[in-house]
Image (cartoon, helix red, strand yellow):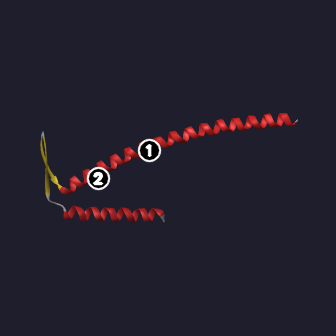
Amino acid sequence: MKRLILLFIAALAVAAGVMLASANSHFVDFNYMAGDIRLPFVVWLFFSLLIGVCLGLCVAMVWAARLHRQVRRSERNREMLQKELDNLRRLRSGVAQ
C-alpha cells in the first residue's frame, strides 16, 4: 500500500513537471562575466531544484552525523553506568553475605 501511494505521488510530480515544462517553454538569458547562456525557463527551474536538493542533502547529512555522534556518546555513557551498576550489585551482594 505504501509503495502504491509513493508511486501515485511520483506520478503526480511527473505530471506537474510536464505541465510546468509546457507552460514555461520560453527562453531565458543568463548573463555572467565570462559570457551568457540561453536556456528554456524550465531548465533553469530544474537546475534550481537540483541545487536545492543537493543543499538539503548536505544539511541532512550534517544533522545525521550529529545525531550519530550523540547516539555513540549516549551508548558509551550507558555502558559506563551499567558497569557502575554491576559493581554496586556485586558490592552489595558481598556485604549481604
Whichever of callouts 2 and 1 sits on the residue coming sooner in the sequence is 2
- Whether residue 19 is situated above or below residue 36 in the rendered picture: below
Residue 57 spot, x, y in % from top left: 38, 47
Mark 1 lies on residue: 63
Residue at 19%, 61% (x, y): give it.
24
For label 2, the SS is: helix
Residue 90 spot, x, y in % from top left: 79, 35
In the image shown, does 44 or 94 lie closer to the viewer?
94
Residue at 72%, 38% (x, y): give it.
85
**Identity, as a three-letter code, of the amino acid under mark 2:** Leu
**Dot label at residue 49:** 2
Instruction: Classify 10 Å Cα crowding around label 2: few (below 14), some (14-19), many (20 and above).
Output: few
The quarter of the rendered structure image containing the C terminus is top right
Residue 54 spot, x, y in % from top left: 33, 46
For label 1, the SS is: helix
State left or right for residue 65 relative to residue 9. right
- Whether residue 88 is situated above or below residue 3 in the rendered picture: above
In the image shown, does 7 or 88 lie closer to the viewer?
88
Residue lying furthest left in this view?
A: 35
Residue at 14%, 54% (x, y): give it.
28
Residue 68 spot, x, y in % from top left: 50, 41
Residue at 38%, 45% (x, y): give it.
59
Q: CA distance from mark 2 to mark 1?
A: 21 Å
Determine the image quadrant of residue 36.
top left
In the image shown, does 52 or 37 lie closer to the viewer?
52
Residue lying furthest right in this view?
A: 97
